[in-house]
């Protein structure tokens, strides 16, 4: 989630909110239909692998399309908490908190609790 992108006044650190959904390549048709249905993002099959990703990095698409979709069609299981963290980061970005050192620190802390960084992984 945290990547170098646009310049900020915080020593070059910046935030890029990216939604990534990974599935086996046998689900490629389903993933591409998600791109079409949501009208955003793209599908990328990883080279030398049998998996592919639906990715969306455009903030407005994430905020106006991805978040409402997954609020309506709830994620269940361990990824539900990751989604709530990710959605919270989206709210911080929308409110420009990521442009402050405190907001950036909060986002970094949230990121440390997600996905592979989570202690229960």
Image (cartoon, rainbow, N blue to C red):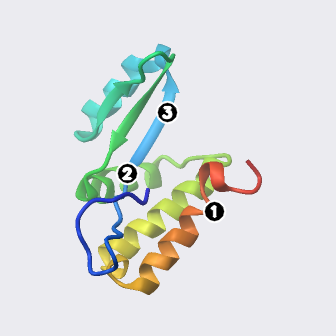
**Residue at which label 3 appears:** 22
Q: Which mark is residue 18?
A: 2
Q: CA distance from mark 3 to mark 1?
A: 19 Å
Q: Position of residue 91 (x, y in %)?
A: 39, 72
Q: Position of residue 71 (x, y in %)?
A: 46, 55
Left or right of 57 in this view: 102: right
* Residue located at (56% from left, 68% from top): 110
Label 3 with label 1: CB-CB less than 8 Å:
no
Label 1 with label 2: CB-CB less than 8 Å:
no
| Element type at mark 2 | loop
As drawn, 110 above or below 63? below
**Residue at which label 1 appears:** 113
Left or right of 83 in this view: 90: left
* Residue located at (34% from left, 32% from top): 34
As drawn, 32 above or below 61? above
As drawn, 85 above or below 68? below
Q: Position of residue 82 (x, y in %)?
A: 57, 55
Whichever of callouts 3 and 1 sits on the residue coming sooner in the sequence is 3
């Amino acid at each position: 989630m945290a990547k170098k992108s646009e310049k900020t006044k915080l020593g070059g650190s910046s935030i890029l909110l990216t939604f990534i959904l990974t599935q086996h390549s046998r689900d490629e048709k389903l993933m591409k239909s998600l791109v079409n249905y949501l009208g955003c993002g793209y599908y990328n099959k990883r080279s030398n692998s049998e998996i592919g990703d639906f990715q969306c990095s455009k903030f407005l698409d994430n905020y106006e399309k991805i978040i409402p979709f997954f609020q309506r069609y709830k994620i269940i299981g361990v990824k539900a908490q990751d989604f709530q963290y990710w959605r919270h980061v989206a709210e911080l970005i929308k409110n420009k908190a990521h442009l402050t050192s405190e907001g950036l620190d909060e986002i970094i802390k949230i990121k440390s609790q997600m996905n592979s960084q989570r202690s229960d992984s």
